[in-house]
Image (cartoon, rainbow, N blue to C red):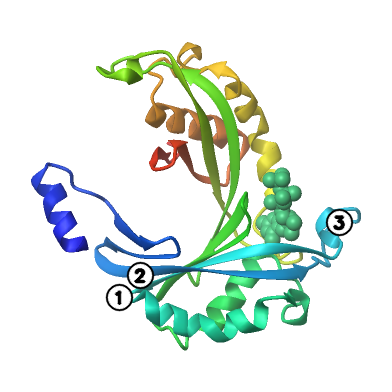
Amino acid sequence: MLDELGRRLEAAGVVPHRLALRSAPDRGVGREGGAWAWRAFRFEAAHRLPYVPEGHPCGRMHGHGYLVVLEAAGGDPEALGEAWAPLGQALDRACLNDFLDNPTSELIAVWLWEQLRPRCPGLIRLHVHETEHSGCTYDGAQHTIWKAQRFEAATCVADADDTRARLHGHGYRLRVHVTAPLDRVLGWTLDYGDVKAAFAPVREALDHQRLDTIAGLESGDVASLAAWAARAARQRLPELLRVDCYERDGVGAIAWPE
Ligand SMILES: Nc1nc2c(c(=O)[nH]1)N=C([C@H](O)[C@H](O)COP(=O)(O)OP(=O)(O)OP(=O)(O)O)CN2
């Protein structure tokens, strides 16, 4: 089905960089070069981070509803379910400090990678979402973390010949992705809280504003907005990898800082 979809898009003049098909809310397949399958799993667990500075909230015992997404070569989400089953059973309603000394998202991802790789040799990467606003991706070598942000704004798309040319508005969602080596003591790349704080002035410049009146954003479209946010964030966050910007579910743009 994915191949047929790819053929039809190409016939219509669209050459997708990456094509993904969600067959159910928790699974799907994709194509980017070769084919891959993905599947999402949830577990509810407690943890504390023993090496954070005194007074950091994550030093206290607390908990999260974790979401893990596995991506593996081939096109079989069922095989991912079989590989995950024993881990899901062990981790759900458990305390992660019983498995790991310092269960940051990044070190949970490494631990999961080591557990899963022998059972799932095609594993390409995995994602650990600690909350709805923060998460980490690991590919066996490198970590990327992201922090989600929201803002509300009006806009008007200058060169649109449809309703986007009218003054309208969106509840925009951004994901700010950062990549850096792991801190040896803290066991993370950068604190999610520090990413949020570094990005805060960029968010504040956009929130409750009319975007097409901001210098550099006159075109008012979501691709320009993602590029603008990536440029602005890069000045405060040298580790910035990219910014994903959605004006609504399924409509957005990704920008890498120049
Ligand atoms: N890079 C990492 N940073 C942080 C980790 C981590 O594992 N890796 N963990 C934590 C805490 O566990 C914390 O509970 C989750 O962080 P955060 O996203 O900041 O949580 P909030 O829900 O409070 O965030 P808001 O979006 O600001 O509400 C901290 N950092």
Q: Which residue is pictured at 50% across the width and 72% down the height?
A: 140
* Foreground: disc 3 or disc 2: 2
In the picture, which quadrant includes the C terminus? top left
* Front position in the image: 131 or 102: 131
- Mark 1 nearby-residue class (10 Å; few <14, some 14–19, many ≥20): some
Residue bearing the label numbered 3: 53
Tag 1 near tag 2, CB within 8 Å: yes
- Say which residue label 1 marks: 74
> Quick check: marks 3 and 2 in contact, CB under 8 Å?
no
Q: Position of residue 253 (x, y in %)?
A: 39, 38
Which mark is first along the chain, 2 or 1? 2
The amino acid type of the residue labelled 2 equals Ala
Disc sitting over residue 37 in the figure? 2
- Work out whether residue 106 or residue 44 is closer to the camera in this orientation and state it: 44
Question: Can I make out residue 141 in this image?
Answer: yes
Please tell me which residue is depicted at 17% across the width and 43% down the height of the picture.
14
Amino acid type, label 3? Pro
Looking at the rendered image, the disc whose residue lies closer to the viewer, 3 or 1, is 1
Q: Residue 193, can we see it?
A: no
User: Looking at the figure, which quarter contains the N terminus?
Assistant: bottom left
- The quarter of the picture where residue 128 lies is bottom right
Question: Picture coordinates of residue 34 (x, y %)?
Answer: 25, 68
Could you say whether the residue bearing mark 2 is in a helix, strand or loop? strand
